[in-house]
Amino acid sequence: MIVSHLSLTDFRNYVSAEVELRAGPNLFVGSNGQGKTNLIESIGYLSTLASHRVSTDHALIRQGSELAIVRARLEHADRTLLVEVQVNRASANRAQVNRVAVKPRELPRYITSVLFAPEDLALVRGEPSGRRRFVDQLLVQLSPRFSGVIADYERVLKQRNTLLKSARGARVAEGQLSTLGLWDERLVAFGTEIIQGRQELVERLRPQVAMAYASIAGIQHRADMIMQLTTLGVQPDDDDLPSAGQSANPGSASADEIAESFRAALSRVRRAELERGLTLVGPHRDDLLLELNGLPARGYASHGESWSFALSLKLASAAVLRAESAVGDPIVILDDVFAELDEARRAQLASAIGDYEQVLITAAVFDDVPEPLAAHVVHIMAGEIVEGPTASKAGEDGL
């Protein structure tokens, strides 16, 4: 899968932009704040319907405009597709494939990508919500139907929390909440699908993460990960609730087993939920535990180790998408990554991604990027594509 042409209208700082892209590496060069990241962010948004920088879509729309449009021509296996998303400030977003309207959540069926940026250090050092989002976005790319499952779960969760808050305010006794059981079953039904999907995905990612980390940091280091489930007593988001340790269902747990443990957990925390007016167990509170040499990476890993682990997660994601996606290789996107790496790790990263169908790279300094990745250069200045030198590094005097 490659993007052969990208078109933007009122996206971020771009009034309009038309960019021709090629198979293999494409390097976007420009000073900080000129719009390099905005370009690659638009492609990431097409494949995940989310930004790696902001939590709301409104920030993607250029100031003073009511909508933004991202349009890309895709090529895969002698087939060409035109995909488009319109991000609206005051109404629901819209999408098209070959000029035919589709639901926006259908777009990941046609384009996949893996984006690595400095912000991804938070995958290792940050809060559980970031790691949940990482797993869910990859899950949706591999199986777009999970977009609907996750949306349904969040809707039920919101309704259930509203009921719990009302009961807390009215001091309703537990036995009087007859409708809570109905919401419990719906929560369990959707939540079980999410838990099972996440665990099966993590099992597929684990060997890829281990190999990627060993290739970056050396075979003497062991990287691993496991889902921590609140339905089994782990409370990564809440130190006030008792924890059962580093528990997780095996990746082969059946849906019935997961659902049974979910129901038991809801029963176990019922009183605490009524006191707080909040749903305390479920996939919305689970975590992905990252381990380095048998210890939690969060809190134990150094800055360099954390950086290598985050990069390994993204390389593993690309490997799984390559093996399982119906649209071929994911588009690999590296946003200002090489500036953070020493020369040896730059070379290792370049080797790891060099054979993907298309790689998009941003850099403020041309010389930060290994030469094999600088075959096609696009220069960015103040939200515009500008003419610039595209020859070898020897000719780059003004960057």
Image (cartoon, rainbow, N blue to C red):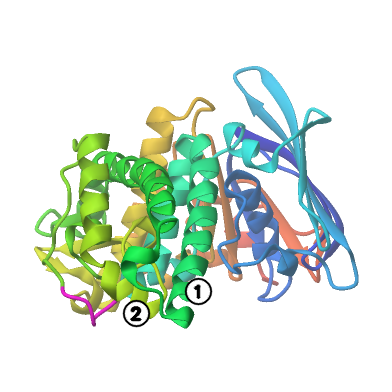
Instruction: Residue 264: give x, y in percent of width and height.
Output: 21, 54
- Residue tagged by mark 1? 166
Q: In the rendered view, tell whether residue 346 sits above or below residue 372.
A: below
Label 1 residue SS: helix
Q: Is residue 97 visible?
A: yes
Label 2 residue SS: helix
Q: Find the magenta span and give its range.
A: 237-242
In depth, the one of 274 and 206 nearer the eye is 274
Q: Dividing the image into 4 quarters, which one contains the C terminus?
A: bottom right
> Residue, x 11% and y 66% (percent of image)?
244
In depth, the one of 119 and 196 nearer the eye is 196
> Residue, x 65% and y 66% (percent of image)?
56
- Residue tagged by mark 2? 275
Give the number of the disc on residue 158. Answer: none
> Residue, x 60% and y 36% (percent of image)?
111
Q: CA distance from mark 2 to mark 1?
A: 11 Å
Q: In the rendered view, tell whether residue 112 sits above or below residue 249.
A: above
**Majority SS type along the magenta span:** loop
In depth, the one of 324 and 236 nearer the eye is 236
Sequence-wise, the earlier of marks 2 and 1 is: 1
Q: Is residue 239 magenta?
A: yes
